[in-house]
């Protein structure tokens, strides 16, 4: 492609709403454009990256024996009523009516649709196992869409669903998918970890997440430095705590329960929950100063919450639904942060609060009031999350007993053993060898396509822009004549460009009438994997070649440059 003909709207400034590097760079490089909160256009270069991720996924899923389908994005409420999720899913589900007042939602995930599909066509054990997948646009009305493609409301997901007659068959497919996911993320050039996960809104018993390790990751993980154990803190189990952890937790509970100064034992008796379950109690909290006490508390492991009683007991402003086993106490925080939200969202809110005050703005104890130019450390003490504190205090690995380490990750993929949750609820059955009707045993397997691309940027960038892993780069090479007015340069550039093109290289020709500095900056920002500059060295019959990932130029003979690069 000739760049003069391309839509390539690179920007000099970071977008004002961008906090993380992938969001900043994807917008600045002209790969995506915001249409509405959490809703993006994929511009030509951005869409090429998306297609590359999709094609890696597609190739590996096909190789693993799964079959591609495409299900509707608009899903009738009826199917969601059958599974029972219409009532349960909450506000993330975007619901609407058609002209006949029939109810629909935009699918956030497709267990219902696929279960109905299998119910219609799969009648015998002989047709099993079966794995169907799609790559499709999902919609989730996220509480806090942010970070560009990482947490959008409209986003592209690969979702696969498998159907089985036996648990062994599901186990084998789960393993097959686990290995397939490892191949996919490795092919995308990502450093990742597979962790034990919580099954969240999807349900089922066993699940694992694929986490791309990155400082900006929204998920807190505990990893064992000695053995393979690692888990999302949402799901982490740990060895019996030692006395230091008990002390840390006690201190934490005392601090957050001011002015009542409830001890962990008192809270434990009240919640009828053993103290060890409360040890991960304090997830986030911070103190602004003695007077303005902003506190976020999240209690986990409390199965039988009596919401009203507990609210009074802890003097909490907000108690979360019992289903989430969580309590939140938010004192003096901007009212906008409060609301009936799920466990996960509380984590996000808490994260957000800490980030907000870290960036110099904080809520005050008055409605709609903020304090500006606040500096953590100077104006208030910013406490670490208790996850980290507890990990530092030596939370032990349940397998080998080594102290767990706290790290952060981006959830790019998630695999679940669903069992018969959906097939039983929706009466999706097959006939076994004896002619008996049995519900399908199911698995499901998701990958965030856009999030994977964003995660790749979080792991691969430098001061000048994105350094795409070559498998995801929008183009592999750009040929740049330093001055398009110099006909010798243009002729050589055109020749090298044509040779690379003929050899099947994804190559660009930067034929713009721009200064060479501007051209190089653009190509570095976008992360094109390599460049050939035809400039002064042409006088000696040479051109300059450089990989995006390198700081050094290599001089190549102009005549054979294309052959050398290939
Ligand atoms: P999260 O914990 O980040 O909210 P999730 O657990 O709700 O994600 P799943 O239901 O497991 O997500 O969906 C499968 C995959 O879809 C996730 O692993 C992630 O890669 C991707 N995904 C989920 N929500 C979003 C989103 N809002 N924007 C982009 N990708 C998403
Ligand atoms: Mg979610
Ligand atoms: Mg999750
Ligand atoms: Mg998940």
Image (cartoon, grey):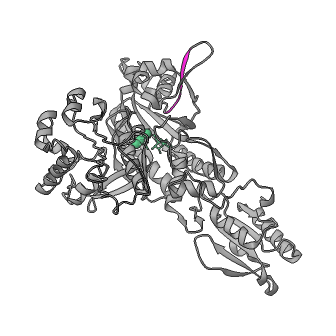
Looking at the image, residue 131 lies above or below residue 386: above
Task: Say which residue appears at 52% left-offset and 28% top-offset.
Answer: 94
Task: Say which residue appears at 36% left-offset and 27% top-offset.
Answer: 420
Q: For residue 332, say whether it is visible.
A: yes
Quadrant location, the N terminus:
bottom right
- Measured as percent of width and height from the top left, residue 247 is found at 13, 54
Q: For residue 566, say whether it is visible.
A: no
Task: Say which residue appears at 20% left-offset and 28% top-offset.
Answer: 309
Q: Is residue 344 left or right of residue 544?
A: left
Quadrant location, the C terminus:
bottom right
- Measured as percent of width and height from the top left, residue 399 is found at 21, 53
- Measured as percent of width and height from the top left, residue 332 is found at 33, 42
Quarter of image, res 67: top right
Looking at the image, residue 193 lies above or below residue 562: above
Magenta-span inclusion, residue 103: yes
Q: In this view, does 464 lie to the left or right of 124?
A: right
Quadrant of ligand 3 in image: top left
Looking at the image, residue 474 lies above or below residue 369: below
Which residue is the extreme one toward the bottom? 540
- Magenta stretch in the rendered image: 102-108
In the depicted view, which residue is nearer to us: 352 or 545?
Answer: 352
Q: In this view, does 300 lie to the left or right of 355?
A: left
In the depicted view, which residue is nearer to us: 242 or 538?
Answer: 242
- Measured as percent of width and height from the top left, residue 275 is found at 14, 43
Magenta-span inclusion, residue 64: no
Which residue is the extreme one toward the top? 100
In the depicted view, which residue is nearer to us: 47 or 99?
Answer: 99
Query: Total number of numbered labels?
Result: 0
Task: Say which residue appears at 21% left-offset and 31% top-offset.
Answer: 312
């Amino acid at each position: 492609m000739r760049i003069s003909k391309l839509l390539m709207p690179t920007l000099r400034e970071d977008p004002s709403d961008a906090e993380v590097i992938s969001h900043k760079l994807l917008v600045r490089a002209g790969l995506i454009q915001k249409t509405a909160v959490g809703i993006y256009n994929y511009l030509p270069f951005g869409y090429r990256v998306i297609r590359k991720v999709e094609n890696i996924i597609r190739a590996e899923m096909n190789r693993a024996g799964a079959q591609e389908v495409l299900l509707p994005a608009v899903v009738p409420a009826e199917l969601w009523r059958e599974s029972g999720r219409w009532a349960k899913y909450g506000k993330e589900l975007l619901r609407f009516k058609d002209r006949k007042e029939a109810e629909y939602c935009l699918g956030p995930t497709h267990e219902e649709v696929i279960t109905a599909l299998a119910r219609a066509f799969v009648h015998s054990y002989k047709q099993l196992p079966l794995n169907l997948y799609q790559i499709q646009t999902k919609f989730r009305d996220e509480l806090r869409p942010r970070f560009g493609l990482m947490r959008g409301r409209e986003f592209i997901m690969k979702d696969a669903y498998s159907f089985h007659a036996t648990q062994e068959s599901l186990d084998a497919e789960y393993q097959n998918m686990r290995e397939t996911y490892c191949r996919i993320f490795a092919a995308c050039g990502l450093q990742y970890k597979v962790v034990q996960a919580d099954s969240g809104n999807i349900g089922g018993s066993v699940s694992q997440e694929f986490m791309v390790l990155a400082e900006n990751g929204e998920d807190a993980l505990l990893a064992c430095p000695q053995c393979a154990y690692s888990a999302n803190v949402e799901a982490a189990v740990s060895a019996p705590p030692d006395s230091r952890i008990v002390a840390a937790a006690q201190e934490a509970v005392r601090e957050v329960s001011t002015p009542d100064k409830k001890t962990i034992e008192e809270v434990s008796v009240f919640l009828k929950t053993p103290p060890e379950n409360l040890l991960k109690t304090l997830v986030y909290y911070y103190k602004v100063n003695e007077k303005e006490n902003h506190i976020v508390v999240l209690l986990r492991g409390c199965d039988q919450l009596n919401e009203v009683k507990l609210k009074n007991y802890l003097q909490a402003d907000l108690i979360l639904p019992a289903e989430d086993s969580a309590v939140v106490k938010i004192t003096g925080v901007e009212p906008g942060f409060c609301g009936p939200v799920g466990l996960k969202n509380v984590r996000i809110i808490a994260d957000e609060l800490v980030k907000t005050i870290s960036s110099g703005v904080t809520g005050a104890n008055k409605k709609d009031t903020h304090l500006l130019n606040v500096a953590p450390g100077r104006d208030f003490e910013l406490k670490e999350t208790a996850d980290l504190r507890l990990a530092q205090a030596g939370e032990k690995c349940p397998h080998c007993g080594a102290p767990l380490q706290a790290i952060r990750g981006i959830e790019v993929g998630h695999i679940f053993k669903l069992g018969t949750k959906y097939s039983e609820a929706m009466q999706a059955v097959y006939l076994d060898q004896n002619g008996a009707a049995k519900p399908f045993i199911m698995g499901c397997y998701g990958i965030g396509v856009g999030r994977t691309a964003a995660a790749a940027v979080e792991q691969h960038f430098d001061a000048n822009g994105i350094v795409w892993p070559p498998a995801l780069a929008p183009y592999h090479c750009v040929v740049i004549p330093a001055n398009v007015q110099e006909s010798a340069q243009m002729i050589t550039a055109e020749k090298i460009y044509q040779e690379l093109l003929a050899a099947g290289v994804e190559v660009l020709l930067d034929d713009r009438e721009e200064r060479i500095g501007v051209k190089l900056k653009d190509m570095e920002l976008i992360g094109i994997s390599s460049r050939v500059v035809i400039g002064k060295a042409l006088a000696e019959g040479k051109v300059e070649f450089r990989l995006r990932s390198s700081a050094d130029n290599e001089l190549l003979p102009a005549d054979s440059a294309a052959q050398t690069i290939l």
